[in-house]
Image (cartoon, coloured by chain):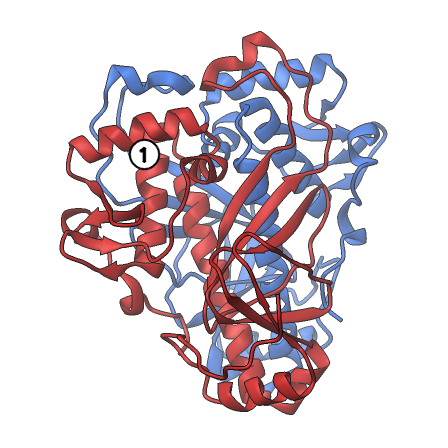
Chain colours: A blue, B red
């Protein structure tokens, strides 16, 4: 990891004062670049902005698990009670994140791709850029709405519905047009998907096969998940998604 | 439903300018009281504030369900493909909510208890109360963090872990001290719980029995769910929860 020297951003939705904020972060050594899967240290009270790459949010249960019981194995669960990590979503370039809530789960952030660059500041620092502060808060409003949609799909009883709903939401927010439809720009393992939808790697692999057979999804190049245009006609991918700002 | 005549609020965390906002809403006929389970009509671009009672957020899938297949019945799912509603959380008195995101799920709000009173305004109206606007946006930051915790528990593979984690989060945020521990102030059906954690009413009833036998939960008076102090020692209930404002 090293302090980034570039000031370019790949953000599809650049903040208006983004360049000034970037310059400020460089000057104040509040900017760092991370290798793939490296943990990004965070503290409550600080606000983080993804300059480049993508951040993966992860939750870990710190509460004691209810003692394993063979009768509970109704959703294909294994009986080992290891520490479960849940994939909670991506934060793309140009987007803010913060980690405040901690109990009874603890939240962490990781660089999802190599050379992910993140800058940070205190909320008080944002007072210098009132318009930017507003955009950051609107971004959190938007993220909150997206999480309500995630919760909607995770409430579905059938794992295959949760899986397809979940992939649809991810592609809707981050997908890029490709030959087959819309493609996630970053790889995601079946274990990570399973950790998000309350299932296992094995089940996800089996159900992904089923979705592939029905031509609802396909795989692109470097293990990237694509959703067929057919699925996405029910929804508006990527930049088309309303940010809810008004 | 009728326009409320009272200006009192039960909010445990009153906004500073709450009374002025309430008066404004009365004057402008932007306030309405709803009966239990009555739908609260919402529009994007408007912000809603719960004056009294509690609002229940619900998500409905509008995407076509993947065709039912007996092999998928691995998590106790029924084969009927009715419209699935997911319970997405409460908004308590003094708290704001908005409904912007719509696709591929649609979000709705309902009065969870009788005489729930809600007022509304355009985001532009909030410009008149810059400090209040900030509090509303901070409340959304807080709600967003809570939803990340919800997603953490919904990522757990075992339904009983999701159930206990989910109840713990609800009681942590809304629970009130009682003889046995901490109690949810509103009833919640097993079907509603099931719809939140991707399970069925039948499974929730069975697992709630199991948690009761282990003295982790109990039922108080009017069908209210209580968590034992033992469970809650790992966490900080109610007002103690940090709001993340700084």
Q: Quadrant of the C terminus of chain A?
A: bottom right
**Where does label 1 land, which residue?**
B161
Residue A185 in sight here:
no
Instruction: Please identify the quarter of the rendering in which residue A177 is found.
Output: top right
Dot 1: within a 10 Å radius of its alpha carbon, few (fewer than 14), some, or many (20 or more) residues? Answer: many
Observer-nearest residue: A201 or B153?
Answer: B153
Q: Residue at x 52, y 14 (%)?
A: B73
Give above or below for B24 relative to B219.
Answer: below
Q: Secondary structure at mark 1?
A: helix
Residue A60 in percent (x, y) is at 35, 43
Give above or below for A96 relative to B13.
Answer: above
Residue positioned most to the top? B71
| Mark count | 1
Residue B188 left/right relative to A27: left
Residue A76 left/right relative to A149: left
Q: Residue at x 42, y 61 (%)?
A: A99
Observer-nearest residue: A184 or B15?
Answer: B15
Residue B48 left/right relative to B76: right
Q: Residue at x 40, y 72 (%)?
A: A45
Give above or below for B165 relative to A214.
Answer: below
Instruction: Please identify the quarter of the rendering in which residue A235 is found.
Output: top right
Residue B151 in percent (x, y) is at 46, 45
Q: Residue at x 29, y 33 (%)?
A: B208
Residue B50 in percent (x, y) is at 52, 70
């Amino acid at each position: 990891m090293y302090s980034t020297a570039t000031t370019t951003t790949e953000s599809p939705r650049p903040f208006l004062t983004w360049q000034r904020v970037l310059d400020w972060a460089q000057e104040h050594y509040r900017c760092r670049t991370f290798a793939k899967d490296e943990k990004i240290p965070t503290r409550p009270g600080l606000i983080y902005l993804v300059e480049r790459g993508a951040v993966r949010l992860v939750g870990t249960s710190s509460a004691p698990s209810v003692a394993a019981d063979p009768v509970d194995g109704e959703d294909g669960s294994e009986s080992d009670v290891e520490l479960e990590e849940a994939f909670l979503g991506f934060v793309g370039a140009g987007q803010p994140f913060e980690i405040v809530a901690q109990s009874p789960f603890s939240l962490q952030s990781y660089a999802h791709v190599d050379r992910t660059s993140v800058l940070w500041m205190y909320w008080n620092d944002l007072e210098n850029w009132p318009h930017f502060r507003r955009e950051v808060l609107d971004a959190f409003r938007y993220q909150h709405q997206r999480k309500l949609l995630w919760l909607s799909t995770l409430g579905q009883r059938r794992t295959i519905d949760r899986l397809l709903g979940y992939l649809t939401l991810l592609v809707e927010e981050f997908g890029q047009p490709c030959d087959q439809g819309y493609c996630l720009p970053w790889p995601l393992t079946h274990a990570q998907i399973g950790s998000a939808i309350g299932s296992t790697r094995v089940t996800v692999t089996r159900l992904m096969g089923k979705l592939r057979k029905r031509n609802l999804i396909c795989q692109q190049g470097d293990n990237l998940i694509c959703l067929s245009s057919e699925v996405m006609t029910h929804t508006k991918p990527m930049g088309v998604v309303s940010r809810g700002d008004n």
